[in-house]
Amino acid sequence: MNETNTFLLDGEEIPFTPGQTIIQAATAHGVYIPHLCWHPEFKAHGSCKICTVKVNGRFGSSCTMAAQAGMNVENRSTELDDKRRTLLQMYFVEGNHFCPSCEKSGNCSLQATAYELKMVSPHFDMFYPDRPVDASHPDILLDFNRCIMCSLCVTASREVDGKNVFSMGGRGLLGRRIHISSESGKLADTDFALTDRAASICPVGVILPKRKGFAVPIGERKYDKLPINLQVTEETQ
Amino acid sequence: MNAPAPAVKKLRVATTSLAGCFGCHMSFLDIDERIIPLLDLIEFDRSPLTDIKHCGPCDLGIIEGGLCNAENVHVLREFRKNCKFLVAMGACAINGGLPAQRNHLDLRDVLEEVYQTDVGLSHGGIPNDPELPLPLNEVHPIHEVVKIDYFLPGCPPPADAIWKLLTDLLAGRTPTLGHGLMHYD
């Protein structure tokens, strides 16, 4: 590795290989940068803005910005975490995120990120949008109340499964949503399967396998045991 | 001459459950025997534990539950008027919680199904006694109506989180919850 290929992340020297983004290099080095729509397996979408860092004093998305030698990156400053918390609060009021009744609770990236950023309230007025549930598929439940439009299911279904089951479309708060690629708009009328990569990619509680909801009890789940910042891994989730 | 030590003024605390299930209050009682030393430091004003009906001037108010009817809003405003520091305790106070699951349904449809068409009830019609507070069209969290000074998430918040809140406040610190005490479920 070329000795000059390093940058500073909160004062710590991080090595990188040319072509890596800031978040890829940080993750490979075991350093946590809060994020929602980025996944180590896929090309960055760059939409959630939670991974925003300051590069040489200017804001940038660490999932899309290439690492460059000598750059000075600010990550977990009070200023950035305050902004991230505000973004999270917008996510929480924009959907219907009721953790006590959600099967994903404890395994949810949105929830774990909110814990990490010490979000104790949604702060803003709730939107309570009317969002559909699709229980048509025999093995999978779709609960769009919790969707954060990260588009990971769209990417996984297209790039790994080669199926294009999901797509994002529409405009505005109520119009923009994930669409199912079938004549009826129902998941049961697609070739979606439990073994698809897209079936296990959802960071929140939208795409859920049926009949497994509480196989692991609340309190013993991934982020119940360790906070998200201590579980940085390049391995697929 | 040694003057007797002045008695420590106890923190006056009021609590209530609005559109909640009293689960947060039960979790509060789960502090178990710690409630005995706590009573040397605080005294209760209006609370389900004292059955005092109206809130007087207090240092701390703790609200469980969101707002599902007009009376909830009046009680909340009484607490805000009288309490120096107001805490939203539990998921329902913070984002509406379980009662807010009715928000995407029409209120009249819900009442008709419960009191008229559903099986198992007396089919006596939708209650309309003037003493009953009118339900709100939607259930809302309390921070949308009054200023809230601190939020204690959880369904319910663990007893240790409630204890941490109280001991932090008694020590004059801003309450903080670490991993394990902060959870939304």
Image (cartoon, coloured by chain):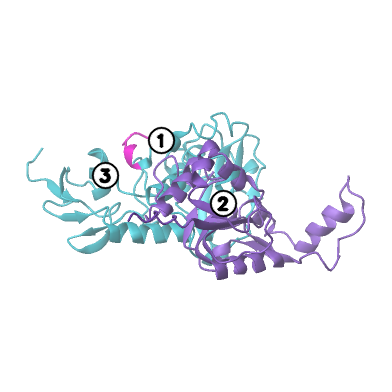
Chain colours: A cyan, B purple
Is B16 left or right of B6, judged from the image as shown?
right
- Cα–Cα gap, marks 2 and 3: 35 Å
Q: Residue at x 56, y 66 (%)?
A: B57
Amino acid residing under circle 2: Ala
Residue B104, visible in the rendered structure: yes
Tell me the number on the disc at residue A237.
1
Determine which residue is flagged by label 3. Answer: A24
Q: Residues within 10 Å of mark 3 (few under 14, many from 20)?
A: many
Q: Secondary structure at mark 3?
A: helix
Residue A152, visible in the rendered structure: no
Is A53 left or right of B85, judged from the image as shown?
left
- Whether callout 3 and callout 1 share a subunit is answered yes
> Looking at the image, which residue sits at the far top?
A215
The chain containing the residue under callout 3 comes to: A
Q: Residues within 10 Å of mark 1 (few under 14, many from 20)?
A: few
Q: Secondary structure at mark 1?
A: loop
- Residues drawn in magenta: A229-237
Query: Toward which corner of the image does residue B56 lie, by quadrant?
Result: bottom right
- Cα–Cα gap, marks 3 and 1: 15 Å
Question: Could you tell me if the residues under marks 3 and 1 are in contact, i.e. CB atoms within 8 Å?
Answer: no
Q: Residue at x 53, y 41 (%)?
A: B36
Amino acid residing under circle 3: Gln
Amino acid residing under circle 1: Gln
> Looking at the image, which residue sits at the far left?
A3
Compare residues A186 and A66 and report the one nearer the observer.
A66
Which tag is nearer the camera, tag 2 or tag 3? Answer: 2
Q: Quadrant of the C terminus of chain B?
A: top right
Determine which residue is flagged by label 2. Answer: B91
- Cα–Cα gap, marks 1 and 2: 28 Å
Q: Secondary structure at mark 2?
A: helix
